[in-house]
Image (cartoon, rainbow, N blue to C red):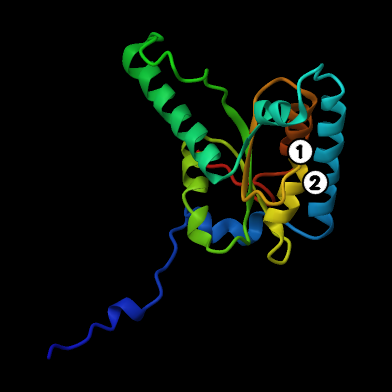
Amino acid sequence: MGKKRSSSLRPVKASKGDPQSEVSSNCYEGERLDHLLVQLTKSIESAKLSKGELPDKMWIKQQFAIGVNDVTRVLERMIQAEADCQSKKEHSNINLRRAPLVPLQAVLLAADCNPRRLTKHIPSLASSMQIPVIFVKDNKRGSLRLGELVMLKTAMAIGIKVKGSIINEAIDELLSSHSPETSLQTHD
């Protein structure tokens, strides 16, 4: 029998730019999380007043990308659209069946979800498009707290779409009031 390799038992060191290593310093938790969620809830409620006759669920779907799959899909389409624009320098109408691309302003991500690999790819996708990621941590209840924002039981990831609404203004204010190294993650 061969010798067992002990190298697989050694911990892997995170690189300096690794989003996973920065989660602990970029999390909103405690009073800071409460303040963030209250501010976002107020902006959502005030934006709902101007929605017209559109049902709540449809309006929320227009304002947010909800869930890991939806956020990933929007981020990947943003990357693909940017690559297409750079290579062709013009907009092509090849895929007419797809909904028009609405870019994301920021991504809210539950940092304490289990298993972690479900959301592991989102920070790197967001950083490639220079979209800030706001980590939410609340003693294994981060996804519950995010779900309350969009009237669902849980949501591990919420992407805020750029729509020029009161919600976007609240996020702009939040992003400009906090420095990147203390609360938000952005990569160049």
Q: Secondary structure at mark 1?
A: helix
- Look at the picture and state if 87 lies above or below 16: above
Q: Nearer the viewer, residue 45 or 53?
A: 53
- Look at the picture and state if 166 lies above or below 131: above
Q: Which residue is mark 2?
A: 36
Question: Which residue is at 75% across, 53% downward?
Answer: 145
Q: Is residue 43 left or right of residue 127?
A: right
Q: Nearer the viewer, residue 162 or 50?
A: 50
Dots 1, 2 in contact, CB < 8 A? yes
Marked residue nearer the N-terminal end (1 or 2) = 2
Amino acid type, label 1: Leu
| Residue 136 locus on image (x, y percent) | 69, 54
| Residue 108 locus on image (x, y percent) | 65, 44
Q: Residues within 10 Å of mark 2 (few under 14, many from 20)?
A: some
Total of numbered circles in the picture?
Answer: 2
Q: Does residue 178 appear in the picture of this structure?
A: yes
Residue extending farthest to the bottom is: 1
Q: Residues within 10 Å of mark 1 (few under 14, many from 20)?
A: some
Mark carried by residue 174: 1
Q: Is residue 74 left or right of residue 51?
A: left
Amino acid type, label 2: Leu
Q: Does residue 129 appear in the picture of this structure?
A: no
Instruction: Please identify, in this view, whether the residue under mark 1 or under mark 2 is nearer the observer.
Output: 2
Question: Which residue is at 51% across, 32% downward?
Answer: 74
Q: Quadrant of residue 61?
A: top right
Which quarter of the figure is the N terminus placed in?
A: bottom left
